[in-house]
Amino acid sequence: MTRHTVQVATLGFPRIGPKRELKAALEAYWAGKTDAEALLSTAADLRGQTWARQRALGADIVPSNDFSLYDQVLDLTAMVGAVPAAYGWGEDRVDLATYFAMARGSRGDDEVCAHGHVHASGEGTPAMEMTKWFDTNYHYLAPEFTADQLFRLGSTKALDEYLEAKAQGVETRPVLLGPVSYLLLGKTRGDAFDVLSLLPRLLPVYAEVLRSLARAGATWVQMDEPCLVTDLSDEAKAAYDHAYRVLTDVTPPIKLMLTTYFGALGDNLDTALRLPVHGLHIDLIRAPEQLAQVASAARADQVLSLGVIDGRNIWKADLNAVLDKVEPLVAAGRKVVIAPSCSLLHTPIDLDRETVLDPEIKDWLAFAVQKVAELAILARALNEGRAAVKTALDASTASVASRRTSLRINDPKVQARAADSDPALASRTSSFEIRRQVQQRRLNLPAYPTTTIGSFPQTVEVRKARADHGKGVIDDAAYAQFLREETARTVKWQEDLGLDVLVHGEFERNDMVQYFGEQLSGFVFTKAAWVQSYGSRCVRPPIIFGDVSRPRPMTVEWWRYAQGLTERPMKGMLTGPVTILNWSFVRDDQPRSTTCRQIAFAIRDEVTDLETAGAAVIQIDEAALREGLPLRRADWAAYLEWAVESFRITASGVRDETQIHTHMCYSEFNDIIQSIGAMDADVISIETSRSKMELLDAFSDYRYPAEIGPGVYDIHSPRVPSVDEMSALLTAAAGKLPADRLWVNPDCGLKTRAWPETEAALANMVSAAKVARHEV
Ligand code: GLN
Ligand code: ZN
């Protein structure tokens, strides 16, 4: 039997640059400080470095066209000329101005909200809609299609970048988002129609691009079809058949690596295997179980690309364990490529930049660069035998063993507590109706009580003071004094405005997850481990490496200070366990549900400490609960069960008289409304102003039992809504839900707003509540 040489492929590399060079170049360009030439030359430098670096690390198959100035889905929209009419594109090729108008709105000033989502604001053509890329924290610009949508070549980027690499002596495998996933990720405009009906019009543009690449000398193209791991209709499966019959039939011919990631092919396996493509990439991190099935069912001449290194997380791989799985296939004569599970876009670039990270923890980690190096070791072991790389394999085994047994990770007390399955831990003492009466007696609030979601404007001064404190320019005492003054001013200001339930303003918090992660054990933070969230925006997610506990109270002192300034109830403000989990890199050595449960107990301790300190109202934000939903419907119930249970553990340590609020800033509840109800919060505040209260239908149809604060003020825009406008929203809400269960609040936190509009809008909001009270 012939043994084929195993090659290393990467499917995509972070493009922001090791020092976020692309971010700096983009922002300078947008600000008008530099010209297009400077931006494009930085971009070209980054591409060149990235290709050279991957080759030097031992990658045999290196991608091109994985780079993007903003977003790879937007690049595809440009490639196929699907620029929405509003952007006035008529030229031959989509130019930079049109490209960035689609990305950022024609005035380039779209608003970013408290959790980093972009929303249209002001005049001009707004940006295209941004949506989360599958279950990652990356956001793409959703294509928009009309029923009469036409496609034509609008960008030669794929060819240009292939040729650019070739000129540097690097033969690449261009990446394209495949046509079926591209359509399925789009939204329709105008009369409803099936996006897949556009496929016959779309395919000629793909064919044209493939032909141009083949003529330029490319032998393979990586066709990303991540939708193959999601629930597909029969029509979508048929679309795959049609698309790949057409695309494998172009002349000159080119081989396609059909690339799937983020989950198992599952019931789409037959579809994927039926397509006449030359190679298939599967994710063996998210779905290790599919290897045997795919290996036995794939055609013998098909190349199998095995995603054996985690492209979504930052842990070193257990290399010997990977070899145990792959060696039998290679020995059996399979053509095998090894690769990360998905594009490395979702990992930070280089661990070597972490100069102050704890060395024990650092030894457990691998970022994009280290992951390519791991693949190179695996390939040598597969091609030359494990003995050829003994030292490296031993080191991998030692790191994995150290992580498993480290005392830093294992805290028996935390483990025992999380293992306690007493259902009482996740239940309040009494039912909502009883709690409600006790709470009403204690709080004595008017009808339509007013409150805010937590943060107040994080002004330039607030951010500067934080940065100065970080740099040591101002000392702890001076910084604390500054924060106290901001807080006191904000409390007084809310009293003057006439709000009923106050907040302290969250000035001491950099970020709603980081602030807690920094005070919990089991978390570590990096200096430079940036991951692209969208466009030029990057995040530095915390790393949850060990058992999570709360060594000491985190927010009680700030709460106490703020409550001491007023007679009105001051809300305790916390981030919930599910949100902390979903916005972090999570340990992969135990189920996510276990880690979430540990965080839940840690936050529960904070909740009970706030209660002991005297807090009558405590808000536990779960902004990212919905984001964590699995890609497959069949997996939703299990996720929701442990997510809701974690929230309930957090909220259930308090007495009946303590009112628990939660907050969620999104607009789709229909499909998860029962789980939202099962969280058993006393009050929930949600985003509704832009949907004109329509989403309250979900709550009213389901008869949501508790109190609701439907946001009446869209905080994503500097626009100040009038009293009448907010009154109309409250009337609409009262038409759908019992008026005596309604609260009055904005859609989300006010941290991205400025004070003048905040003051005007909240004054109007309080007036609207007063108007509503007269009508009760
Ligand atoms: N309490 C947080 C704030 O007001 C909530 C933010 C969010 O939901 N994204 O900033
Ligand atoms: Zn919010």
Image (cartoon, rainbow, N blue to C red):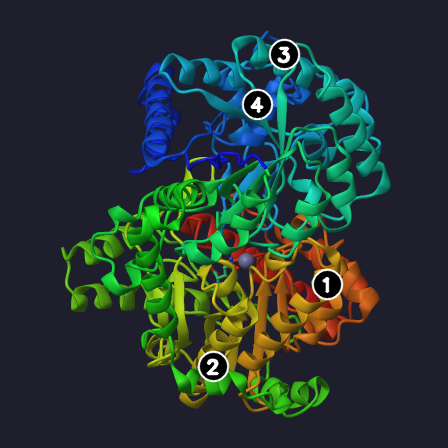
Residue that numbered label 3 is attached to: 211
What residue sits 53% from the left and 9% below the top? 216
| CB contact under 8 Å: marks 4 and 3 | no
Residue that numbered label 1 is attached to: 672
How far is the residue under mark 4 from the one under mark 2?
56 Å
Q: Quadrant of residue 547?
A: bottom left
Residue 500 lies, with reference to residue 40, above or below; the image says below
In this rendering, position of residue 210 left or right of residue 118 = right
Residue that numbered label 2 is attached to: 607
Q: Earlier in the sequence, mark 1 or mark 2?
A: 2
Q: Earlier in the sequence, mark 4 or mark 3?
A: 3
In this rendering, position of residue 123 left or right of residue 29 = right
Across and down, in percent, residue 677 comes to 71, 72
* Circle 3: element type: helix
Viewer-proximal residue among 384 and 486: 384
In this rendering, position of residue 302 left or right of residue 44 = right
Across and down, in percent, residue 440 comes to 63, 85
